[in-house]
Image: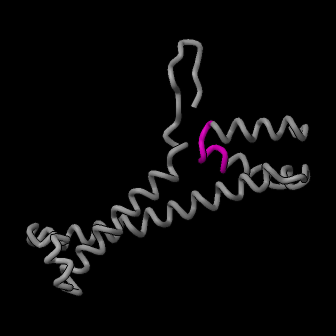
Amino acid sequence: MKFNGKRQMTSSIREYYRAIFLIVFAVSLVILIITSNDLIFRNSSMINDGLSLQQTGNWEYWIFAVSLVLTISFFYLFIKYSRDYNKFMSIINGNSKQNIVKNMADLRKIAKNLGPKYQKELKDAMEKWKVK
């Protein structure tokens, strides 16, 4: 986060993607487990403890389907974002100018996807290694 001359805080939501993806994945996974129990496994201990969505009636099938799609999608997004982040950081923090030059196209694409903070880090690394 940065403060400009007027002391306003500016930030990009892309800086929080990793946390957002993880939170949505976790919530959808919990809902998927609850609806799976209600529809498939019927474990009475979970139902008796109040962990049930049976009161939603036929909507529970839709909740199950949506939670399944969200769980898979946000797990994929979290893994993809984490891989991009790790690749970016390993190349930028490496000790090889050749590695940075060789991967410049990927670094620019990843930095654009990760947000302004990482675009600045790439720019700083390019200045450090005198890469154009």
Q: Quadrant of the C terminus?
A: top right
Q: Is residue 73 left or right of residue 34?
A: right
Q: Quadrant of residue 86?
A: bottom right
Q: Nearer the viewer, residue 34 or 100?
A: 34
Q: Is residue 44 left or right of residue 116?
A: left
Query: Does the stretch in magenta take in 115?
Result: yes
Residue at x-position 52% and y-position 36%: 12
| Chief secondary structure of the magenta portion | helix
Q: Which residues are magenta?
A: 110-116
Location of residue 84 with respect to 32 vertically, above or below: above
Q: How many marks?
A: 0
Location of residue 67 with respect to 12 vertically, above or below: below
Residue 113 position in % (x across, y down): 59, 47
Residue 61 position in % (x across, y down): 19, 73
Residue 68 position in % (x across, y down): 33, 71
Q: Quadrant of the N terminus?
A: top right
Location of residue 119 with respect to 65 vertically, above or below: above
The colour scheme used to paint the residues is one colour
Query: Does the stretch in magenta take in 108?
Result: no
Residue at x-position 55% and y-position 64%: 79
